Amino acid sequence: MTLTIKNEGNVWTGIVAGRLDTVNAVVFEKEMKPLVENADKEIVLDCKELEYISSSGLRQLLTLRKAVDAKGGKMVILHINDELRNIFTITGFFALFDIRN
């Protein structure tokens, strides 16, 4: 799993690639700190290259969303594949996030 963070003005983009499984969720939590610190801005997670997400990965996304809500920012998730869409739907997470393709 890799997380590449880019900043353009008030938009912070995290590009997530690989597998966000239980082991990688610990790494993701540390690497997403710049996004949490700037949660008062627009946070975009580009998941075009994300292959898989576990419950631990979903928990990290929820943590980020809560930070965004607390700081008055906005969060958008882009480009989830069909498998991820199914996971988000089954878990009820699809309704919790602004997901766009």
Image (cartoon, grey):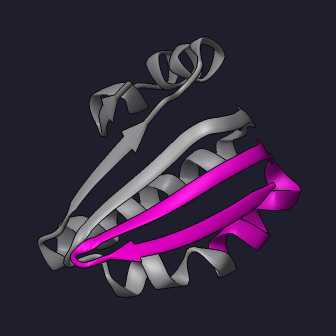
Residue 34 against residue 94 in the figure, above or below: below
Residue 41 against residue 25 in the figure, above or below: below
Q: Position of residue 30 (x, y in %)?
A: 67, 81
Q: Nearer the viewer, residue 18 or 22?
A: 18
Q: Based on the displayed image, in which of its 4 quarters is residue 55 positioned?
A: top right
Point out the residue furthest to the right here. Answer: 23
Residue drawn at 56 percent across, 53 percent down: 59
Q: Does 78 sit left or right of 22 as displayed? A: left
The stretch of residues the image draws in magenta is 1-29
Residue drawn at 40 percent across, 25 percent down: 92
Indicate yes or no whether the magenta region holds residue 17: yes
Residue drawn at 81 percent across, 52 percent down: 22
Residue 55 against residue 60 in the figure, above or below: above
For the C terminus, the image quarter is top left
For the N terminus, the image quarter is bottom right
Residue 100 against residue 64 in the figure, above or below: above
Q: Nearer the viewer, residue 59 or 6?
A: 6
Q: How many marks?
A: 0
Q: Position of residue 27 (x, y in %)?
A: 77, 71
Residue drawn at 37 percent across, 55 percent down: 44
Q: Position of residue 4 (x, y in %)?
A: 64, 66
